[in-house]
Image (cartoon, rainbow, N blue to C red):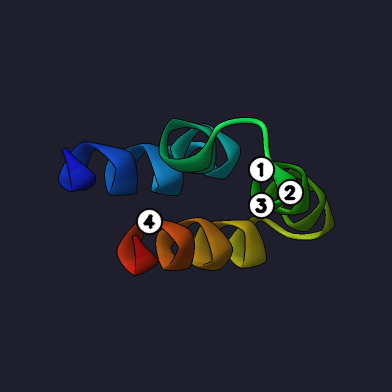
Amino acid sequence: MDVVRIILAILLPPLGVFLQVGFGLHFWLNILLTLLGYIPGIVHAIWIIAKR
């Protein structure tokens, strides 16, 4: 299941984070990072998925 989340995190980072943690702080932080730059959003999403 983590492979699917990582693929979704690469395509749409907030979706990958949402599937991992729901509507928490990390989700909103990831939306902000994705808006500021696509790469920081991807890095944060993969980090959240790999951490748990």
Residue wearing tag 3: 26
Real-space Cα separation, disc 4 to disc 1, in angstroms = 12 Å
Q: Which mark is residue 49?
A: 4
Residue carrying label 2? 25
Q: Nearer the viewer, residue 39 or 28?
A: 28
Q: Looking at the image, do the residues carrying marks 2 and 1 touch, with CB atoms under 8 Å apart?
A: yes
What's the CA distance linking mark 4 and mark 3? Answer: 11 Å
* Label 3 crowd (10 A; few <14 / some 14-19 / many >=20): some
Residue type at mark 2 is Leu
C-alpha gap between disc 2 and disc 4: 14 Å
Q: Secondary structure at mark 2?
A: helix
Instruction: Work out how far the residue at label 2 is from the one at label 1, CA to CA, in angstroms.
Output: 5 Å
Sequence-first tag of 4 and 1: 1
Q: Secondary structure at mark 4?
A: helix
Residue at 56% x, 32% y is 22
Neighbours of disc 1 within 10 Å: few (<14), some (14-19), many (20+):
many
**Pointers 2 and 3 in contact (C-beta within 8 Å):** yes
Tag 4 near tag 1, CB within 8 Å: no
Mark 3 residue type: His
42 on left or right of 28: left
The disc labelled 4 sits on which kind of residue? Ile
Circle 2 Cα neighbour tier, 10 Å, few/some/many (<14 / 14–19 / ≥20):
few
Residue at 21% x, 46% y: name it: 2
Q: Amino acid at mark 1?
A: Phe
Residue 41 position in % (x across, y down): 62, 57
Q: Secondary structure at mark 1?
A: helix
Q: Are marks 1 and 3 in contact (CB under 8 Å)?
A: yes
Q: Position of residue 9 (x, y in %)?
A: 43, 45
Residue linked to disc 1? 27
Task: Give the label on residue 44, or none.
Answer: none
Dot 4 crowding, Cα within 10 Å, few <14, some 14–19, many 20+ = some
Residue 4's spot in the image, x, y percent?
22, 37
